[in-house]
Amino acid sequence: MDSDSFRQGGTVDIQIARKAFVGSQGKLLALRDILLAISPGEFVCVVGGSGCGKTTLLRIIAGLETEYEGAVFLDGKRVTGTGLDRGVVFQEHRLLPWLTVHDNVAFGIAGLSRAERVAKIRHYVNLVGLDEFEYEYPHQLSGGMSQRVAIARALVGHPEVLLLDEPFASLDALTRMRMQQEILGIWEAERTTVVLVTHDIEEAVYLADRVVIMSPQPGTIRNVLPVPLSRPRDRTDREFVRVRKSVHDELFAPGSMARLALENS
């Protein structure tokens, strides 16, 4: 699989003036004045507490939310709905239990010859390290393995952008760290643009080129901090700790609603 095509696209330009929901309590303003440009092949983490709108932002980029004021552009083309140019991985893997790993990964692709289809599926199953489990069923997999299948399924359509909605939140701490290393390995191999939302500051600093810090209700971008650390990153390194503290201090700055949201998340 030629990964160079991933480097040619994946520019995301986000211009959201307002996103509101209507509920029993009336209209809730979820996002306001979101301006963000993401470069091809960049790994961006969006950090914020519960209620800051980070998942709503991801759903807008994915084309799952279309009722808002503003626009999102992918490689200069306005996003008006879902498409294979964006792969999405949710917090829950959402695998179909009656299908094998092979067939779950195959679920989102069509229009290929059988040989091309099998080769493509096998490439991504191998990429996520599950070549020995290709014909197992979801109930035979661990939580981390199931998330790897979900990532392979998202990548098999050859997307320009991979969108990750707290994909490791339900995993234990050790598995979570292993999955962070896995997603970095996949990103380094494919060089697709990645946007990951999380409330875990250390995870964001470990993974990202830039960390987008959000304040909640209505969700706005408080700051965008670069992560000037080489890879692989050492969580105990002094510079790593310094950057992590910078993100923490920005989130918990005096008067920031992010403080309360993070404490309750």
Image: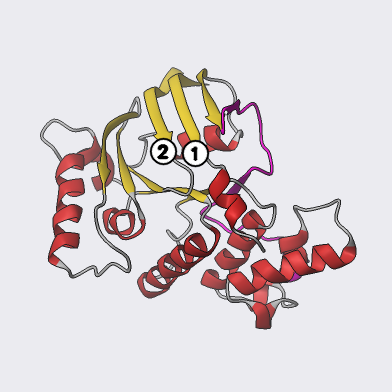
How many other residues sit within 10 Å of disc 1, few (<14), some (14-19) or many (≥20)? many
Any part of residue 161 in sight: no
Q: Quadrant of residue 256?
A: top left
Q: Which residues are magenta?
A: 75-102
* Mark drawn on residue 54: 2
The percent position of residue 57, horizontal first and vertical second, equals 46, 34
The percent position of residue 140, horizontal first and vertical second, equals 65, 78
Q: Does 96 appear in magenta? A: yes
The percent position of residue 157, horizontal first and vertical second, equals 70, 52
Residue that label 1 marks? 58
Any part of residue 180 in sight: yes
Side of 5 where 168 appears, left or right: left
Mark 1: amino acid: Leu
How many other residues sit within 10 Å of disc 2, few (<14), some (14-19) or many (≥20)? many
Please name the residue shown 68% across and 69% down the image.
123
Q: Which quadrant of the figure contains the N terminus?
A: bottom right
Mark 2 vs mark 1, CA separation in Å: 6 Å
Asked if labels 1 and 2 touch by Cβ distance under 8 angstroms, the answer is: yes
Q: Quadrant of residue 252?
A: top left
